[in-house]
Structures are given as structure tokens and as C-alpha cells.
Image (cartoon, grey):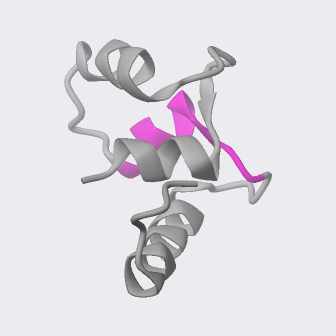
Amino acid sequence: MSEDVTDERLARLKREFASLDGDGDGYITEAEFRAHFPELPAEAMPALRDTGDADGDGRFSMEEFIRLMP
């Protein structure tokens, strides 16, 4: 994980990740993103995958999520 992530920020991101990870498997899928953000434009998911899905498995791990979030 990024070395510049403060404890407070890490705790907040873990809470946000858990709220998106609907099945609790440790990954956020496109379906889980869409369920949480139904108004998400169609072009947003490909942009998120290109930016944040480092291993290209079609889902976001906690580490990928942290790198993706501002």
C-alpha cells in the first residue's frame, strides 16, 4: 500500500471499501460499483478499470481501491 496513507485515511478508505464490497469477498466488482452508484455513466467503468484495475482481473482489491481514491 502507499506509504503516504495516514492511519485516519486508511481507516476511512477501509470503511468505504467495505460498504462497496457487497458480498464481503475482499474485492469490488463492476456490479457492486453499479449497485452502489446507479447513476454512474456508462463510460465511467472503463475509465475506472483503466485507471485502477492494476492486475486486470476486472475487480478492485483494497490496494487498488486505495490507489484509485483521492
Residue 35 visible, this orientation: no
In front here: 31 or 53?
53
Residue 44 visible, this orientation: yes
**Magenta residue check for 41:** no
**Magenta residue check for 29:** yes
Q: Position of residue 2 (x, y in %)?
A: 49, 55
Kindly identify the residue that appears in the image at 37 percent across and 42 percent down.
68
To which quarter of the image does residue 1 belong? bottom right
Q: Position of residue 11 (x, y in %)?
A: 50, 81
Q: Position of residue 38 (x, y in %)?
A: 30, 40
| Main secondary structure along the magenta-highlighted residues | helix
Kindly identify the residue that appears in the image at 21 percent across and 38 percent down.
39
Q: Position of residue 20 (x, y in %)?
A: 51, 56
Number of numbered labels in the structure image: 0
Pick out the residue farthest to the bottom: 8
Q: Is residue 49 left or right of residue 32?
A: left
Q: Is residue 24 left or right of residue 55?
A: right
Pick out the residue farthest to the front: 3
The magenta segment is 26-36
Kindly identify the residue that appears in the image at 36 percent across and 13 percent down.
46
Q: Is residue 29 above or below residue 13?
A: above
In front here: 47 or 68?
68
Q: Is residue 1 above or below residue 39?
A: below
Pick out the residue farthest to the right: 25
